[in-house]
Amino acid sequence: MSSPEIRVFPSEYLREFSTRVFMHFGVPKNDARIAADVLAVADLRGIDSHGVARLHTYFEMLTLGRINPRCKPRIVRETLSTATVDGDNGLGLVVGPWANTVAMDKAEEAGSGWVSVRHTNHYGIAGYYPLEALKRDLIGWAMTNTTKLVAPLWGAERMLGTNPIAIAFPGKDEPALVIDLATCAAAYGKIEIAKRHGTPIPEGWAIDRDGRATTDPNAMIDGGAILPLGSDRERGGHKGYSLALMVDVLSAVLSGANWGPFTPPFALRQEIPKRSVGQGIGHFFGALRIDGFIDPDEFKRQIDDLVRTFRATRPAPGTSGPLLPGDPEREAEVQRRRDGIPLVLPVIDELRDIAKQTGVPFD
Amino acid sequence: MSSPEIRVFPSEYLREFSTRVFMHFGVPKNDARIAADVLAVADLRGIDSHGVARLHTYFEMLTLGRINPRCKPRIVRETLSTATVDGDNGLGLVVGPWANTVAMDKAEEAGSGWVSVRHTNHYGIAGYYPLEALKRDLIGWAMTNTTKLVAPLWGAERMLGTNPIAIAFPGKDEPALVIDLATCAAAYGKIEIAKRHGTPIPEGWAIDRDGRATTDPNAMIDGGAILPLGSDRERGGHKGYSLALMVDVLSAVLSGANWGPFTPPFALRQEIPKRSVGQGIGHFFGALRIDGFIDPDEFKRQIDDLVRTFRATRPAPGTSGPLLPGDPEREAEVQRRRDGIPLVLPVIDELRDIAKQTGVPFD
């Protein structure tokens, strides 16, 4: 597994390191463990961009006092099946799991639970939250808005985040369907990789600073924008744009957070929005009790049937047929639980920098 | 407005005709009015494919006894905020509004309401349902599964419907955001138009019967499939596929309806699925009380601000800038309320055929 460019670490080692880094800033032990768990799940599931590769940014935000390490999230308004949570400017990795638990508790009481969250920060992978719901035999949803990076269809500038939607459905003998998708055409990380390699990006991913379609990664990075899912009008770019707006409204307008281009940045080098229209960023969580609709065993048997039916789809030429949502992440998890988490050198250097500045040992 | 190819009819005239046609088959007057209203709203909003242009298909299904004209939808399972409805094989245009009302009533009681529906049929435009929720100051959602027409990414055959998602958010002085999107790359109607005109379809819309990308509309229609939103792997086709699966599970697996390739067809000439895995097709409705989260007036002022902010986006070259979801339909409605509904001759001929066979006058 190891190469000069990559070193492999046991998941538990990285989880412990993250926990201690959070605790160094005064995050209570239990909160620190939860936050580290969100990062560890991303690394285990192969979503490298959202695991310990992000720890240095959390570290910077905590160092500068821009995130409250001892946040006390609280419900500021509620009904039997809904709530608004104020995250007290805490780590999204702490506020998110707390608010998701409120949604799940409400679902167990009232059949469903829906929680909109303001005054919070980046919450890790959206898929973490419906995975937690699966542990309680619930259907979980999660959305969040994020810093502007995506243009609305026919716009020439960044107005929306990558605004993901995640939801999961349990099977009986087959694995759960785990959906976790950003509502834009491509991930920013892929554009950064193309820049590093000096290769063009596919058509339909991005526009330049003048709003023209581009295949030059530099043109997107230098003041351009990512396109919404669907890319252009002909292929449904208005649909991806609409989904991104939906996520923005449910997460941020409904909670009283900042929306659209005013969503505060996560990374330090990104520009601060011109206006503030709310508090922090916003999340939206949902949970549905399966037995509020149907016998859960029957539901899971049908999901198994559906999974097998879709696996038996006639394959398109040059492929081995459709995957089910969650397949790649589950395969990564099996391998990484066994072999460990591969980290590239720049990430290792960042973790060493954190170690140096906090005194938490790493290596 | 009129031309040899098009005639214009007042919306009320078409609504009255549809009502009487439904009543001819024994649909109770109130149900017939509601069903006609769903069609009328589609025509008013410029969604011609889902208005009276579909009446002949409903007529055929009723003539053949494949839809129950005197359906009695009922709740078969419920919690405070959720329910499963059995549509008694009624018109989706009757069952849909009934189940949507259950969701809205539950929202008013419990903060939110979520209803999955089985044993139902085609319910018209998804956007109708959140528009009804706006009248009660609720955020409404609607989804439905439909007959197979779309391939999963890397599949070579039709496995999923166009599975739409609709949701609407009210503004204060600005119009509501009304999102209504199919989770596939393009509408089947557009492929039919290209076939009629003998023109190619854009790349990214479709595959042929062997699963190969095609720009030939005939190749799609003759045993091929539409691609999911995002089209291919590079541009996020797995995302559109995942969204279509999400709609399928919430609408059909959760309710006990037929899902995926087993969803029964709406039009008569489409093939009957090999297996039945539930009853009829499935819908999913949701409603959220805004004041369960935030002061509704504050919410609407923020939506106004968001609408104005997005309208002020710097336009992409060759465009006048981004639209907001619902703009084109609202403009169509203003014009059509004033000028009437333009119908093409083939649709008029179908309505005349219905008139001849039912004795309900039309012209």
Image (spheres, coloured by chain):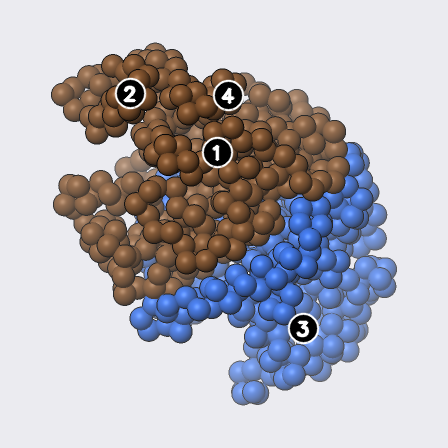
Chain colours: A blue, B brown
Judging by the rendered image, the residue that carries numbered circle 2 is B355
Judging by the rendered image, the residue that carries numbered circle 3 is A351
Q: Chain of mark 2?
A: B
Q: Chain of mark 3?
A: A
Q: Residue at x 63, y 34 (%)?
A: B74
Task: Report whether mark 1 lies on the same chain as mark 2.
Answer: yes
Q: Position of residue B105 (x, y in %)?
A: 67, 28
How far is disc 3 from disc 2 in space, using C-alphas? 76 Å
Query: Which quadrant of the rendered structure holds the C terminus of chain A?
Result: bottom right
Q: Residue at x 41, y 36 (%)?
A: B65
Query: Which quadrant of the rendered structure holds the N terminus of chain A?
Result: bottom right
Which residue type carries mark 2? Ala
Q: Residue at x 66, y 79 (%)?
A: A337
How far is disc 1 from disc 2 in space, using C-alphas? 21 Å
- Toward which corner of the image does residue A186 lie, by quadrant? bottom left
Residue A260 visible in image: no
Element under label 2?
A: helix
Q: Position of residue A338 (x, y in %)?
A: 65, 83
Q: Residues within 10 Å of mark 3 (few under 14, many from 20)?
A: many
Residue mark closest to the camera, 3 vs 2: 2
Q: Looking at the image, do the residues carrying marks 1 and 3 touch, with CB atoms under 8 Å apart?
A: no
Element under label 1?
A: loop
Residue B28: which disc? 4
The relative height of residue B190 versus residue B91 in the rendered view (above or below) is below
Task: Report whether mark 1 lies on the same chain as mark 4.
Answer: yes
Q: Would residue B293 appear left or right of A69 to someone viewing this image?
A: left
Which residue type carries mark 4? Pro
Q: Chain of mark 1?
A: B
Residue mark closest to the camera, 1 vs 3: 1
